[in-house]
Image (tube, rainbow, N blue to C red):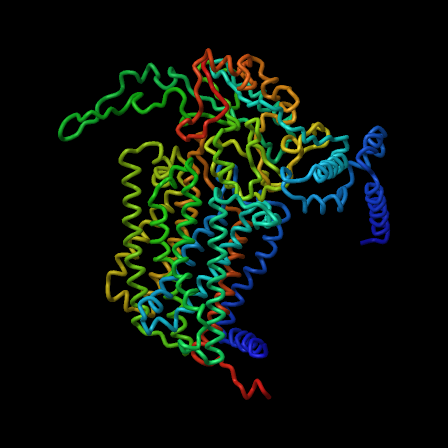
Amino acid sequence: MKTALSFAMDFGSYALKGGAKYYAWLLFLAFFILVGSYTAYRQFTEGLILTGATDQVTLELFFANFVFTAHVAAAAVLVVAPGYLYHRKDMKELAVIGEIVAMIFVATGITFILFHMGRPDRVLHMIPGIGFPNFPNSMLVYDTIVLNVYLLLNLTGVIYILYKKYVGRFEAKQLAIWFRPIVFLAIAWGPLIHIVTAFVLESNARVGLWATAVLPFAFLSMAGASGPSLIVIIFLLARKFTKLEINDSVIDLLTTIIAWSLGIIILVFAAEIFTLLYPSTEHADSLKYSMFGHNGLNMYVPWFWVTMVAILGSFVALLFRKVRRSYDFLLPLVCFVVFIAILVEKPMILVFPAFSPSPLGEYTEYHVTFIEFFNVLFVWAIGFLSLTLIVKGAIGVLTGEVRYDKSSASS
Amino acid sequence: MSEEKIEELKAADDVQQGRREFLKHVSASSVAALVAAPESAEAVVDATNPDADITVAEYFQGHFLLMSDEEKRQALERLEKRYSAKYGKKTTVSDAPAPKDVLFGYALDISKCIGCRRCVHACVKENNQSRHDPEVQWIQVMKMPKGNISFTVDQLDKGYPEKSGFGDYGVQVGGNAYKTAGLSTEDAQNYYQDDTVPDKDYFYMPVQCQQCEKPPCVKACPVRATFRDHAGVVLIDYNWCIGCRMCQLACPYHARRFNWGEPNLPPEEMNPKTHYFGSRPRMRGVMEKCTFCVQRTREGRDPACKEACPVGARKFGNLLDPESDVRKVLATKRVFRFKEEFGTYPKFFYYIG
């Protein structure tokens, strides 16, 4: 008990220590949390009418961002798997960072869903016993289950690894017998949360754009690109500003994963565009709308083409050794572009245009409101704040700067 | 703030307090007497927080279908009390069950419909929808061009085969080539503002909840707040809905409407005869939709939209009764279901003359 308490104390105090740049970053996030508290209060008291959502476009920015958080959360597996499945020594230590990213992003996604719900106060109606989840019919029930289990698995993994490292007993034989199954289950569960999230969308036959078997593959490849992009940025920052040792080989592996995930994304898009546009039936209407507009409504057109160019450009860029080896400038830049492109793709290509035409033939543009936008930033700011603090503390544990000191504990 | 103003506010607060105390002791039965006296009725209307106890009890209630009879009675009483106080009218909330051996069906003659939207407004009036910001309408009337609009005379000879280096390969362009014709949502106008109807160049098709036999919305609901009753009508427990809008996403008929904000229902326009699953006033953040006027049809009356139709384009009845209007339409007319390809098997049939 005493050890656990000192773990929390040491971890927390290390996480809060940092240079001027570190505090500037935390303050930057705190600003959005401050503004967001007000906008969130407005939304929870006045309702979703403050967002841009309508009966025609019923999913708002929150849901689109939720899909993206599932991308990143699922992709954290790609950092855990090389260490545990392929026994790569350079990755095994770092696996915990991947699990932290998974944990934070799943939690962020669940928060987005709470913002998406009209009655978040009634969320308990989904808990068996209190309510009656519509099992096995409703895909949202499956999604709730897989997300929460994934959150729990990663939470257990992160706390256990960090604590064991902290007290200095991290040899294989000193780990509990249940730990390895948990890690392997988490690795298997990562893709699962993503496939189920794709099924939540696919299950709606009336949305032509989503009625495609390729959606889970698109999601997994986007996960493979966006998640490692974030992790590469985290690793490069950690390498520069902390004592944590990260080999070039780790970065290179992740870069390869990003590049070929982008390759698969391009194939998936090409396949989808061909399948829809060649026969050009009513299923192609939404895609045509986002590619070329409809009768003067062309808000999504620039987003579509810019995103396509960004994905294609990043893929080509990562084929050059010079870019892959430019750890200080070009590689983080490309990673940032990939992350943002896939983040933007969610609302602007996947979600909003899919609702036009509506079942009764209406074409609609979605206009994000300020309150909605700041609520999204609010959730992201909370997510990134916790990510920063926990990763910082974890780095302290991994480098041995945060360690259980028997003499200080007993004194 | 000046001293007087504070005094004023305090006085107002006391009055408010008094009203609240007063309301706590008002039982459902005495509300009727209350309404009779104009001044006290006004007091009831003004009360902003009708009764905190009621709200808490309502918040913790379970799924209505699974309540015991006693719990149901209490839930209805709570609602009646709250609505009566809020709208200043004696409001009844019924939970009359669906009649036995009945399967409700609807038939609509699109050759008769004149697009007057009387059904739309009768529905809003009957079912206590939000009246402004926004006005929620459960029926949407599509205005579709007749063939003579699609295939305009001046364009008749303007079509030509697309030319290519290899000659004509059979694709027609120009003129009327790519015009839609007939029942297509592609050129449908849903928000037409005509001074007079019907427009002779158009025909009209009202769409509302199709009461599917295999409703995708019921399948999608994660908490079973929406379900099909044994008379075939898909209903919602507004107090159980979590507002996730998965049903709206699943519905191929755009039949479901969400209360994005607090519904604006002026007390003087409120219809006090309500049903738990039907026309009772909704709250913010829940889904609602056409119930075939469950508060009327369960008592053997017709839905408001059918009553409002001036040309008799709407027929309603029991699909299990061979003598009902709907069955006669099915037997004698050319009937079709809207968006049959979705495999939802609606009990709402369209027919042509």
Which quarter of the rendering shows the C terminus of chain A? bottom right
| Nearer to me, A75 or A289 | A75
In the figure, residue B335 lies in which quadrant?
Answer: top left
| Nearer to me, B329 or B127 | B329
Residue A222 coordinates in the image, percent (x, y): 36, 54
Residue that appears at 45% across and 14% down: B352
| Nearer to me, B152 or B30 | B30
Which quarter of the rendering shows the N terminus of chain A? bottom right
Relative to residue A134, is residue A255 depicted above or below?
Answer: below
Relative to residue A297, is residue A9 depicted above or below?
Answer: below
Residue B212 coordinates in the image, percent (x, y): 49, 29
| Nearer to me, B144 or A249 | A249
Residue that appears at 35% across and 35% down: A283
Residue A153 coordinates in the image, percent (x, y): 47, 62
In this rendering, position of residue A321 left or right of residue B290:
left
In this rendering, position of residue A409 left or right of residue B179:
right
Residue A73 coordinates in the image, percent (x, y): 43, 58
Q: How many labels does the image show?
A: 0
